[in-house]
Image (cartoon, rainbow, N blue to C red):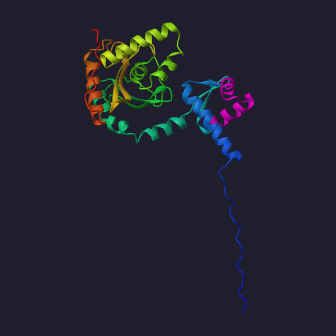
């Protein structure tokens, strides 16, 4: 008896990863986000178009689509900034980083003992980014620091990264974005950070002062921990008790990360 032929099933279409338009779009959107991450601030359509050599209409279409998806957010007047979905994804990504896990207890303890907001920042792109914030639970009025906030290079955390960043050529490139006067001031701050092991800054936001200390993974800077408070609550003195407590915590966290010796201030040979 002749065998019945089985019905032919329709084969599902296969998506071939190659030079197709879909992959090109993904690549271009990733490039847009990369530009935003490196820029560290809001951008206008014309700026992105110029940077990526795109037509303004094309740049606007990409930015509007990313904004609709939550990757960017509209700031009005043709300007966009990194959006909430990226911040959530970034927080999830860094959640498994060793320094973030180890820093949790240190931040909570620092916040409660000092009654100040404690912050952990990592280097992302070309600026420090806030990845963990711990506020003192018993304090009536608290200072809110946005998770995922990109800090300027002249912040307390920024000075530390510039002071201890292993790629000195890259540091020089970053400093070229500042005026000569600003650059010299930042360079003096970098020397202070190396000498004191902490840096105090009160210029990022009016009425707010931050003191930060570097955390090292073996011999390289892995992040910074900081206190952020008001001018009256956070002393400007890099040798204050608050700064010393922060420095001690940074040293212990560095040892947890495999630092072979205590993180100590670099003493000037001419001192």
Q: Which residue is drawn at 63% across and 40% down?
A: 27
Residue 266 sits inside the magenta stretch: no
157 vs 266, nearest the viewer: 266
151 vs 196, nearest the viewer: 196
Counting every numbered tag in the picture gives: 0
Report the magenta residues as a range. 45-67
Q: In this view, does 204 lie above or below 30?
A: above
Image location of residue 136, percent across then percent down: 32, 28
Quadrant location of the N terminus in the rendered image = bottom right
- Quarter location, residue 31: top right
Quick check: 153 left or right of 33?
left
Residue 201 visible, this angle: no
Residue 198 visible, this angle: yes
Image location of residue 46, percent across then percent down: 69, 24
- Quarter location, residue 199: top left
Quick check: 7 left or right of 267?
right
Q: Residue at x 66, y 45 (%)?
A: 23
- Quarter location, residue 76: top right
Q: Main secondary structure of the magenta part?
A: helix
232 vs 85, nearest the viewer: 85
Quadrant location of the C terminus in the rendered image = top left
């Amino acid at each position: 008896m002749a065998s019945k032929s089985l019905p032919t099933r329709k084969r599902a279409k296969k998506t071939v990863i190659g030079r197709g338009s879909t992959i090109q779009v993904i690549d271009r959107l990733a490039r847009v986000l990369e530009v935003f991450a490196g820029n560290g601030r809001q951008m206008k359509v014309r700026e992105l178009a110029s940077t990526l050599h795109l037509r303004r209409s094309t740049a606007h279409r990409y930015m509007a689509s990313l904004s609709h998806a939550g990757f960017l957010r509209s700031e009005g007047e043709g300007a966009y900034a990194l959006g909430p979905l990226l911040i959530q994804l970034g927080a999830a990504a860094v959640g498994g980083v060793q320094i973030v896990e180890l820093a949790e207890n240190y931040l909570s303890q620092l916040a409660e003992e000092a009654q100040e907001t404690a912050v952990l920042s990592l280097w992302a792109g070309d600026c420090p980014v806030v990845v963990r914030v711990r506020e003192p639970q018993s304090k009536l009025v608290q200072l809110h620091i946005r998770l995922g906030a990109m800090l300027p290079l002249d912040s307390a955390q920024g000075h530390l990264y510039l002071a201890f960043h292993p790629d000195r050529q890259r540091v020089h490139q970053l400093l070229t974005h500042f005026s000569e006067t600003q650059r010299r001031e930042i360079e003096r701050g970098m020397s202070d950070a190396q000498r004191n092991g902490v840096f105090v800054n009160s210029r990022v936001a009016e009425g707010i002062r931050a003191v930060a200390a570097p955390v090292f993974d073996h011999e390289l800077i892995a992040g910074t921990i900081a206190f952020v408070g008001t001018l009256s609550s956070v002393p400007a003195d890099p040798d204050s008790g608050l700064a010393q407590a922060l420095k001690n915590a940074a040293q212990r966290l560095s040892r947890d990360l495999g630092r072979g010796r205590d993180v100590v201030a670099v003493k000037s040979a001419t001192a």
